[in-house]
Amino acid sequence: MLFKKFSLLVFLWVSLALTIRAQDTVQKVIADRTNSPEQQKKPYVILISIDAFRWDLADKYQAKNLIKLRESGVQADYLKPAYPSLTFPNHYTIATGLYPAHHGVVDNIFYDKARDVVYRKSDKKMAVDSSWYGGKPLWILAEEQKMLSAIFYWPGSEISMNGIRPTYLYNYNEVIPIDRRVAIVKDWLQLPAEKRPHFIALYFPQVDQAAHKHTADSEEARAAVQIVDDAIGKVVEAAKATGLAVNFIVVSDHGMTTIDRENTIPLPKAIDMNKFKVPPGNVLLHLYANQQKDIKPTYKALKAEATTYDVYLSKQIPKVWHYNKKNDLYNRVGDIILVPKLPNAFNINGIKPDPGQHGFDPAIRDMQAIFYAWGPNFKSGLKIPAFENVNIYPLIAKILGLTFSNKVDGKIKVLAPILTNP
């Protein structure tokens, strides 16, 4: 019995070691890059994303650091995610200022007709293949203009565009402890002026992980909020210790709601899987027709049987989502999409979905996110109406003094009034 327990312990340690080893924890640095003399004079911006941090969670769970810091600067009633309110589409929207249908990452999983390939956010090869990603992320914009950037986990940051990527980069992993991440940010800010990044982006997944499995109303979600709030407090203190005047922007990609996981929607009978490709999804189903002639008959059949979900032809998708056929620049949105009505969700592969979900209409209250900002370039004690997250891109470019000619959907006029020098 003792030998069996010892063997099990060894097995668990080996498994843990292999898991850690499998994750990329090494910082990638382009050693020969420096800030230009002009860029060394520019402000600093740290952009922090808390995945799934719903608009009400700071107050609901008394996130003392975030509450104190937002009151010293600017806070929006809420931040409007892009549709669909999912992680990869929205993080890349924040990074590029483009709606998902305009930058190409239209879902966490989708089908590309031209390639005859299904994109999956978990596929490491696709994560580094820039041909899947449109637009110009903020870190690329900065690097092109001789301003250094540092990214600590951000969807889309692992790609190289025209041979350019962030000077300092950590790929996504769950191994590096939060305190170590804080220390790394401090190390970046303590580098010599010519090597110091002026744009830093951080990503915290803890709230999303807890809220998916246990809902946003759980004790696990409360604990995750406290962990992240504590970490942000430490990042702010670390920045203060450097003596630099740093601007902070804290956002989330979307909120979180609770679905009925016991009474899910199976694959509708009207869908013939020999005629359509249907990637898995709980909150949005894309139907890609093998032949155009099958679209309208299937649409009509779906409309006739649908009670717990809405059915849209691609050209009929609500304009407010910027997701219809006219907006679909990369032809990656389904010919037909199915959108469940809350609290319903799809289950087409027999795997019961987590109780916490997002991806629904951004107008739904539970989908709405946060925007807090403070620092030398922001006004103090200001509350502003809700706005779309595409407007964050031109705001950060303005603070950093970066110019851009690439098309973006965001407008600087939306957030210019929150700056001390608009």
Image (cartoon, rainbow, N blue to C red):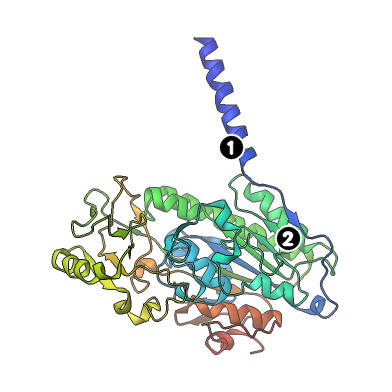
Q: Residue lying farthest left?
A: 304
Judge from the rendering whether residue 97 lies leftward or rightward of residue 403; answer left or right.
left
Q: Which residue is mark 2?
A: 168
Q: Residue 208 location in percent, x, y?
A: 46, 55
Q: Residue 406 location in percent, x, y?
A: 61, 82
Give the quarter of the image for residue 133.
bottom right
Asked whether 271 or 76 is in front, the reply is 271
Secondary structure category for the residue under label 1 = helix
Amino acid type at circle 2 is: Tyr
Q: Residue 99 location in percent, x, y?
A: 47, 76
Q: Circle 2: is it few (<14), some (14-19), or many (20+) Cα within 10 Å?
A: some
Secondary structure category for the residue under label 2 = strand
Quarter of the picture containing the C terminus is bottom right
Q: Circle 1: is it few (<14), some (14-19), or many (20+) Cα within 10 Å?
A: few
- For marks 1 and 2, the one nearer the N-term is 1
Give the quarter of the image for residue 285.
bottom left
Q: Which residue is mark 1?
A: 19
Give the quarter of the image for residue 136.
bottom right
Distance CA(mark 1)–CA(mark 2): 24 Å
Q: Tell me whether the residue at label 1 lies in contact with that at label 2, contact meaning CB atoms closer than 8 angstroms.
A: no
Residue found 84% across the figure and 63% down from its top: 32
Q: In the displayed structure, would residue 28 be above or below residue 189?
A: above
